[in-house]
Image: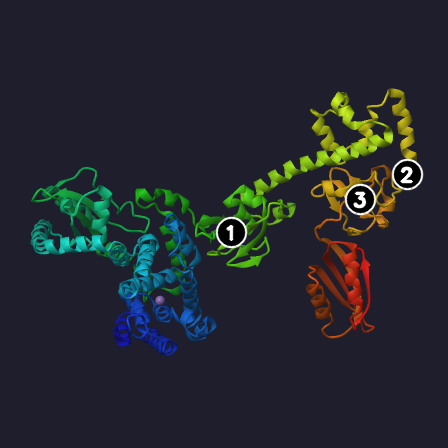
Amino acid sequence: MIRITDILDQASTYLPPTDVALIQKAYVFSAAAHAGQIRLSGEPYLSHPLEVSNILVDLRLDAATIVAGLLHDTVEDTEASVPQIIELFGPEVGAIVEGVTKISKMNFESKEQAQAENIRKMILAMADDIRVILVKLADRLHNISTLEFQKEYKQRAIAQETLGIYAPLANRLGLYRVKVQLENYGIKYLKPDVYAQISEGINRYQDQGQAYIDKVSTMIQDVLLENDIHGRVKGRIKHVYSIYHKMKQRGLTLDQIFDMIAFRVIVTNLRECYTALGLVHSLWKPVPGKFKDYISMPKANMYQSLHSTVIGPEGERIEIQIRTEEMHQLAENGVAAHWSYKEHGSKKAQEGDRFSWLRQILDWQGDLKDSRDFMSTLSMDLFQDEVYVFTPRGQVKELPEGATPVDFAYTIHTEVGNRCAGAKVNGRIVPLNTALKNGDTVEIITDASRNPSRDWLQFVKSGKARSRIKHWIGTEERTRSLALAKELLEKEGRRMGINVGKAIKNGDFDPVVKEFSFRQIDDLFSAVGHGRITARQVLRKLLPKEEQKHEERKVAGTGAAQTKPQDPDSISIKGVDGVLIRYAQCCNPLPGDPIIGYISRGLGVTVHTQDCPNVANMEIERLLDVSWGGEEESKALPARIKVVCKNQRGVLGMVSSLLAKEGINIDSGQFTSGVDGMSELDFVIEVKTTTQLYGIIEQLRKLDAVQEVTRSSAG
Ligand code: MN
């Protein structure tokens, strides 16, 4: 087990004493927090954070990152809390630990492999500080290196996740050394037989290989020296995963892989890179199409190098990389090299760099095979404006920032969106307008009787959801407007002695359609349904000319407003309830109230209570007899109540808990306390019938502190 002194020693080679002291302090804290915990290996748990911070110190990262490495499991696995860590180690460390905890809590193991790229993006989007990912990668690296103590299914799951998500993430960030290790462990646990076969092949090849490496290295070294270039040449047998990848990619067996060895030439400056390349090419014939200049065209992760493949001294292919020392550091440690502690770099400059770096990584085009995901991550803006959430089956869905369960439902299927009745986020029921967060698991509750609501347009964020909702409302509104128009026309027809059904069959409306400049009969009816023209105006056209005049005179005298409850002639709003029927907000009519309809131009019918003071001022010919229709279960509607009560502690709570007990929603409430020791509570609550409303009012009146309760109207 690594000791803290080793880490402190290494840290003190590049960090100031105050930073080293902070690392020491974090060690003490972590040791106390994890005291008594044991890993599956039988080692004290503390060995894990120590190893993680050792990986980070190897990358020469700053103190905050190393401290976070020591503390990274304390919030999840011990009594420690983020505020406590912030207090002791500062907000920077707190934020990193919190970020790592957040990612660690999410289980990607069971998620579909095809979603890997989305998950990688999700992780990047969640970590607003790149150091969160560095700590997470170090954590994964140590965990996978001690995987032998886990159960086999767990080993496979972690290996799969590592190869699918974390190794590519390390690659994206240019952490080559970390990537190689993650890949090797990944293949070891995912395909143990392949791993054994390749390692064995490498071992067999070792002696022969070393002789070959020495021979080629010397040849390169000599030609460089002759030309006054003092470079380092290094030959190495490729790592297991990259050999496996080559075998798979080219369909070769191990024996057919000749280029298991790669050479690297490290020189002092950029000019020498190109000179060295020329010299190597003069020594051995280059393989056409294999030269790549990543110096003038760096990879997405800012990797720079010259790559070439040549036909070597024994007729075999040799891969050669040529780069400067600086490029080499970056190639090995990528973003970590960039993040590594710089004594002279000002804090401010680093802050700015953090994001420009990440932006570059995401912006720059990598390998050609990655061009598709390059396109999708092209702009950082695009990236930050997205939120990634899971379906219950582990698929990742990409949504615009602020997207709600309704947006999510429409990405699943239009029908799921249209029938969306409720949503669960991470197992809990939430309102449909809840903004989703990265990593949420969202489940939509559908109900075949539910329909999209116009209100959804207020909060949906995705274009898809918006257009589907509008489409549905458009279609639905037309259907409803036609149904309402037929009822209006039939009712008016009975009064005027016209059989509307017959008239439609006989084509009597055709000239009327023309006269009103509509294209077809449905357009005419739709206009009636929306109240743009009245049924009477339309039907009058069906009467003989002289009667039309007579009819006009009659209109003024008709008392259409005089309604008896349950008039058999009235229009049941049940049938056309919905987009074309609105409930007036002045009087909030409820089933049970005597009501009257008012045809508002272009808006369909607004339903008022018959005693609503506003009705007196309305145009008589646009008033309409309406009734509530059946007594079946109806939806809750808003009702206003005014409660006058004593100015006494807890009154508000008593009233609202009584409402809650009765299962009644409070839409809004206002509390006004008067000088006379009395207060007034104005509530808008949701009830289904007047019976329910008056029942509630009775119950509220029984409360001691309550003096009076009345149903009220707006304004
Ligand atoms: Mn850990």
**Colour basis:** rainbow
| C-alpha gap between disc 3 and disc 1 | 44 Å
User: What residue is shown at x 34% (from left), y 67% (from top)?
Assistant: 62
Between discs 1 and 2, the one toward the N terminus:
1
Q: Residues within 10 Å of mark 1 (few under 14, many from 20)?
A: some
Say what secondary structure mark 2 lies in.
loop
Q: Amino acid at mark 2?
A: Gly
Q: Quadrant of ligand 1?
A: bottom left
Q: Amino acid at mark 1?
A: Glu
Q: Please tell me whether residue 679 is drawn above or below residue 622 in the rendered image.
A: below
Decide if residue 93 is in sight here.
yes
Say what secondary structure mark 1 lies in.
loop
Between discs 3 and 2, the one toward the N terminus:
2
Image quadrant where residue 43 sits: bottom left
Label 1 belongs to which residue? 401
Are the two marked residues, 3 and 1, in contact with CB atoms closer than 8 angstroms?
A: no
Say what secondary structure mark 3 lies in.
strand
Q: Is residue 326 left or right of residue 512?
A: left
Q: Amino acid at mark 3?
A: Ser
Image quadrant where residue 103 sits: bottom left
Disc 3 or disc 2, which is closer to the eye?
Answer: 3
> Residue 470's spot in the image, x, y percent?
61, 40
Q: Quadrant of the N terminus?
A: bottom left
Label 3 belongs to which residue? 627
User: What residue is shown at x 46% (from left), y 56% (from top)?
Assistant: 439
Label 2 belongs to which residue? 559
Looking at this view, is 493 or 439 the one in front? 493
